[in-house]
Image (tube, helix red, strand yellow):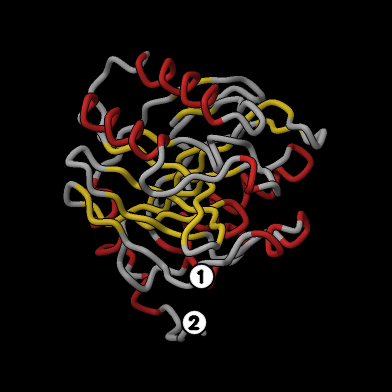
C-alpha cells in the first residue's frame, strides 16, 4: 500500500515518483496499490492528462508488474470511444489487465459532467483470491459494494480530503464488517491545485473490522500487510451473517 503525494496533472513526473517508490519495495509482495488518479491528482481537466489503454502509463505498469512479479492497481484517466473514464486498472505480471470504471462519479466536484460513470461491478480472480476494486466516492454506497459475489477483498483507491477523513475511516471499517471481507483503502497525502489537503489515513481492515495497518497521518509511507485466506472462510463459516443478507437487484 503506497500512500503518496501526487504531482498535479503531470503523468511523467508521477511515473518517475512511483517508479522510485516501487523500486524501494524489496520484499516479495503479491499486489501493490496506488491512489486514485495516481498520474494526475483528482483533476476535472481530463484533456490535460488522459491516456489510452495502449498509452505510456499502461506500458509502464505492465513492465513494472512483470519485473517485480506482482500485480499493481490504481486508477487513472482513460479516454475510450471519445469518452473519459476514471478507471481502476489491475495489472497482472503476465500482462493481462482487469478494469473497473468508477460507478459513483463525485457530483460535488463536477466529476459527473466530465467522466462517464461505469455500469459494471468487477471481480478480479488473482492467486486464489476474489477481489472487488472500487474507487473513492463508491465507498459511500453500501448497496454497490454489497458482497453478493462472495469476494474476499474490497479495494478502494482514493483522493479523499482531510475535512471528511473521519467518514473515510468509519466507512472502510463498516464495509469490512458488513461484507465479512478484508477492506483496503489507499488514499493520497499532500495538497492539490484546488487547495484541498489530503491526510492519507490509508488502512486495511479484516472481516471483523480490526485495523491491520499503522499509517502516519499526512506523510508519504509504504506499508506491507499480509492477508490470510483462512480468516475469511473461518468467520463466514462460524458466524454465517452473509446467509441472512437481503436479496436485491442493482438497476
Q: Residue placed farthest to the right in the image? A: 195
| 3D distance between C-alphas at marks 2 and 1 | 7 Å
Quarter of the image for the N terminus: give it.
top left
249, above or below 100, in the image: below
Is 159 placed left or right of 38 in the picture? right
Is 73 placed left or right of 226 in the picture? right
Residue at image position (74%, 37%) is: 162
Residue 247: which quarter of the image?
Answer: bottom left
Is 201 placed left or right of 71 in the picture? right
Q: Nearer the viewer, residue 158 or 173?
A: 158
Bin the neighbour count of mark 2 within 10 Å (Cα to Cα): few under 14, some 14-19, many 20 and up: few
- Estimate the x, y position of residue 99 in percent, counting from the top left: 38, 56
Q: Nearer the viewer, residue 240 or 104?
A: 104
Residue at image position (53%, 36%) is: 38
Residue named by callout 2: 250
Tell which circle, 2 or 1, labels the residue nearer the N-terminal end. 1
Q: Nearer the viewer, residue 185 or 230?
A: 185
Q: Nearer the viewer, residue 216 or 180?
A: 216
* Mark 2 touches mark 1? (CB < 8 Å): yes
Residue named by callout 1: 144
Bin the neighbour count of mark 1 within 10 Å (Cα to Cα): few under 14, some 14-19, many 20 and up: some
- Estimate the x, y position of residue 160 in percent, counting from the top left: 66, 43
165, above or below 233, in the image: above
Amino acid at each position: 500500500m503506497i500512500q503518496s503525494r501526487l504531482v498535479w496533472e503531470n503523468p511523467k513526473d508521477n511515473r518517475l515518483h512511483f517508479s522510485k517508490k516501487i523500486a524501494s519495495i524489496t520484499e516479495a509482495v503479491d499486489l501493490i496499490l496506488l491512489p486514485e488518479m495516481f498520474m494526475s491528482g483528482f483533476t476535472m481537466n481530463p484533456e490535460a492528462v488522459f491516456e489510452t489503454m495502449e498509452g505510456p502509463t499502461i506500458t509502464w505498469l505492465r513492465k513494472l508488474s512483470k519485473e517485480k512479479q506482482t500485480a499493481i492497481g490504481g486508477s487513472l484517466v482513460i479516454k475510450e470511444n471519445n469518452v473519459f473514464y476514471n478507471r481502476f486498472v489491475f495489472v497482472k505480471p503476465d500482462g493481462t489487465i482487469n478494469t473497473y470504471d468508477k460507478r459513483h462519479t463525485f457530483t460535488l466536484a463536477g466529476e459527473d459532467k466530465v467522466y462517464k460513470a461505469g455500469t459494471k461491478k468487477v471481480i478480479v480472480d488473482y492467486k486464489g483470491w476474489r477481489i472487488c476494486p472500487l474507487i473513492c466516492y463508491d465507498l459511500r454506497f453500501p448497496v454497490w459494494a454489497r458482497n453478493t459475489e462472495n469476494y474476499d477483498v474490497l479495494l478502494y483507491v482514493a483522493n479523499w480530503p482531510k475535512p471528511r477523513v473521519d467518514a473515510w475511516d468509519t466507512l472502510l471499517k463498516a464495509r469490512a464488517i458488513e461484507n465479512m471481507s478484508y477492506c483496503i483503502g489507499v488514499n493520497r497525502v499532500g495538497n492539490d491545485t484546488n487547495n484541498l489537503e489530503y491526510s492519507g489515513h490509508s488502512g486495511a481492515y479484516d472481516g471483523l473490522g480490526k485495523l491491520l495497518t499503522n499509517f502516519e497521518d499526512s506523510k508519504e509511507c509504504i506499508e506491507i500487510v499480509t492477508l490470510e485466506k483462512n480468516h475469511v472462510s473461518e468467520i463466514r463459516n462460524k458466524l454465517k451473517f452473509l446467509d441472512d443478507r437481503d436479496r436485491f437487484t442493482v438497476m
